Amino acid sequence: MKYIIFDFDGTLADSNELFMKAWNLFAEQYNYDQVNADDLITSRNLTIPQRAKKYRFPMHKLPIILPKIYRYFKDHIEEVKLFEGIKEMLDTLAQKGYTIIILSSNAKENIELLLQQERVTSVSQVLTSSKIFGKDAIIKKFMKQQQATPDDVLYVGDEVRDIIACNKVKVPFMWVSWGLDGFELIEKENPKYVVHTPAQLIDTLK
């Protein structure tokens, strides 16, 4: 294995609270329900369509609302931090010879701003997907460019949409338990690894 691709929000970046603020900011304008911290917990094992239905979110307006949310993210980037132990984990993996990639549906500028803010220098490349369900195409393109096989790549993430994307291109998936989605959703897709701390992630790859 040469490449480790990390999801960003909920995997590296502790950004749920900021996204919740952004979600609530536009709720009245687009006529959907606001959420609180308890809602994030109780909806962990719901799919994105199930959450949209529960909170009356208009999925057909996602291309309009999501850029607004990412602009809010940029304007409040100082409120976002990496999860504890993430920077040290990334540095250790890079020192061990792995090439570290980030793949996210968040804006590339936002990711690079946070990496700069947190003084992270171990990330080799930031890839972004304009579609929240389009990561398999980006992974496939990346492997073709690098002349890599699925065995050369590991994807690390917290959401079921990511493991579904990985399964489409036969890339092994490692689920981290500190993110958005719950294990009940994830286990149906058979993740290769399950980890609960950044230190455990390093130990798993020894």
Image (spheres, helix red, strand yellow):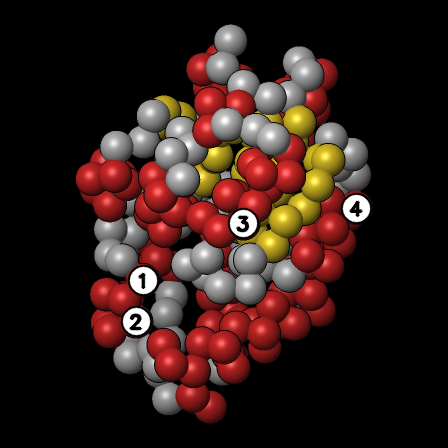
- Check disc 1 and report its element: helix, strand or loop: helix
Residue at coordinates 49% horizontally, 64% vertically from top-left?
Answer: 131
Disc nearest the viewer among 4 and 3: 3
The amino acid type, in three-letter code, at marker 1 is Ile
Q: Which residue is mark 1?
A: 48
Q: Is residue 45 left or right of residue 30?
A: left
Q: Which residue is mark 4?
A: 116
Residue at coordinates 43% horizontally, 82% vertically from top-left?
Answer: 61
Q: CA distance from mark 2 to mark 3?
A: 25 Å
Q: Which residue is mark 2?
A: 52
Q: Position of residue 97 (x, y in %)?
A: 68, 16
Q: Give the mark nearer the N terminus: 4 vs 3.
A: 4
The quarter of the picture where residue 118 lies is: top right
Q: CA distance from mark 1 to mark 2?
A: 6 Å
Task: Give the camera-side residue of 194 and 190.
Answer: 190
The quarter of the picture where residue 144 lies is: top right
- Give yes or no for contact between labels 1 and 2 (Cβ–Cβ under 8 Å): yes
Q: CA distance from mark 3 to mark 1?
A: 20 Å
